[in-house]
């Protein structure tokens, strides 16, 4: 009787999830203050003890764009499209890519980085990767403002008449951002779950993301790959791998929205959306399965 009474006194019962696909929005909303706290921590502490501080949010994409412009557009003579400044072309691709890669890299080490707090207190574990995605969204917004600033400069304050303008399809920009977030979150949760057993993956993530960038049309237009395949300078399978890479679709659509260069296809938008949802659901399944026993293997 005493045991029965003691059990009735508990307000909450914490037990492993029964469902593989379980994203308890009610519980996440209950812990929303903790989520915002982690977001604030990620934004503030990243460059807190550096000399330049938040300026790194601006410096990294700018210097990368300059290097890409010099190497790929000046030395390699890759054309970006009529009337489009190569610097803006590269900055648009890098801004979109940085958000995806930051989400993937930031969530790919969730269990190992937070094993101390995970082992001491309960809260929905998915809050940690979600906080990473939201904090990187703030950084993406800052880099987008940098892009807009340089766009205004090139279009209105230079002597060269550039023939570029935002596309009406920019209304689909929120969906493109969601696609990048879901893919980064999904792949990151998969990798984070696997690194609890296979630590080698943590060393391969940075290298793999770098290779993926070169296969995602960040520094060149998709039309260049299509032309090289038609001329026989590239194997057909290489062209297909690049063209059907969902991040290639995202980068191409983002540049089309911002600069009206490249192409936009609703079929490809649906394709990228479908892939991102599948990747996210697979990542959530693996993450939830690993959450039950990761503390014994980390």
Image (tube, grey):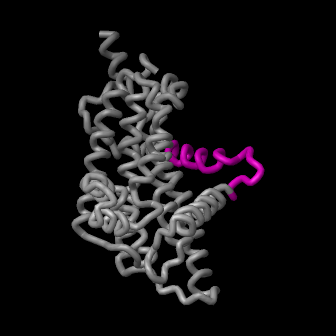
Placement of 68 over or under 23, stated as above or below: below
Residue 283, position as x, y percentages in the image: 32, 39
Residue at left offset 47%, top offset 57%: 97
| Front position in the image: 193 or 86 | 86
Residue 168: name its quadrant.
bottom left
Placement of 29 over or under 15, stated as above or below: below
Residue 176 seen anywhere in this rendered image of the structure? yes
Placement of 57 over or under 126, stated as above or below: below
Dominant secondary-structure state across the stretch colored magenta: helix
Residue 202, position as x, y percentages in the image: 48, 32
Residue at left offset 68%, top offset 48%: 47
Residue at left offset 45%, top offset 34%: 123
Indicate yes or no whether the magenta region holds residue 274.
no
| Front position in the image: 274 or 15 | 274
Residue 258, position as x, y percentages in the image: 45, 74
Per the rendered image, the range of residues in magenta is 33-55
Quadrant of the image containing the N terminus? top left
């Amino acid at each position: 009787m005493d045991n029965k009474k003691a059990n009735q006194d508990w307000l909450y019962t914490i037990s492993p999830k029964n469902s593989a696909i379980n994203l308890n929005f009610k519980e996440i909303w209950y812990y929303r203050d903790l989520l915002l706290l982690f977001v604030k921590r990620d934004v503030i502490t990243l460059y807190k003890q550096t000399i330049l501080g938040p300026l790194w949010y601006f410096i990294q994409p700018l210097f990368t764009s300059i290097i890409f412009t010099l190497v790929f557009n000046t030395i390699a003579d890759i054309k970006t499209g009529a009337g489009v400044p190569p610097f803006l072309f590269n900055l648009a691709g890098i801004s979109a890519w940085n958000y995806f890669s930051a989400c993937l890299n930031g969530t790919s080490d969730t269990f190992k980085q937070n094993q101390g707090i995970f082992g001491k207190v309960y809260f929905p574990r998915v809050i940690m990767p979600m906080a990473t995605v939201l904090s990187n969204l703030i950084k993406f917004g800052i880099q987008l403002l940098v892009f807009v600033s340089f766009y205004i400069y090139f279009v209105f304050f230079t002597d060269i008449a550039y023939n570029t303008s935002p596309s009406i399809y920019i209304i689909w920009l929120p969906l493109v951002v969601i696609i990048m977030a879901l893919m980064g979150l999904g792949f990151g949760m998969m990798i984070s779950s696997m690194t609890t057993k296979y630590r080698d993956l943590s060393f391969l993530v940075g290298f793999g993301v770098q290779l993926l960038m070169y296969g995602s049309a960040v520094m060149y237009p998709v039309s260049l790959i299509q032309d090289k395949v038609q001329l026989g300078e590239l194997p057909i399978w290489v062209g297909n791998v690049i063209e059907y890479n969902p991040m290639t679709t995202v980068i191409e659509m983002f540049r089309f929205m911002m600069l009206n260069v490249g192409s936009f296809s609703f079929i490809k938008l649906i394709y990228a959306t479908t892939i991102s949802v599948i990747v996210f659901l697979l990542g959530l399944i693996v993450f939830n399965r690993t959450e039950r026993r990761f503390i014994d293997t980390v």
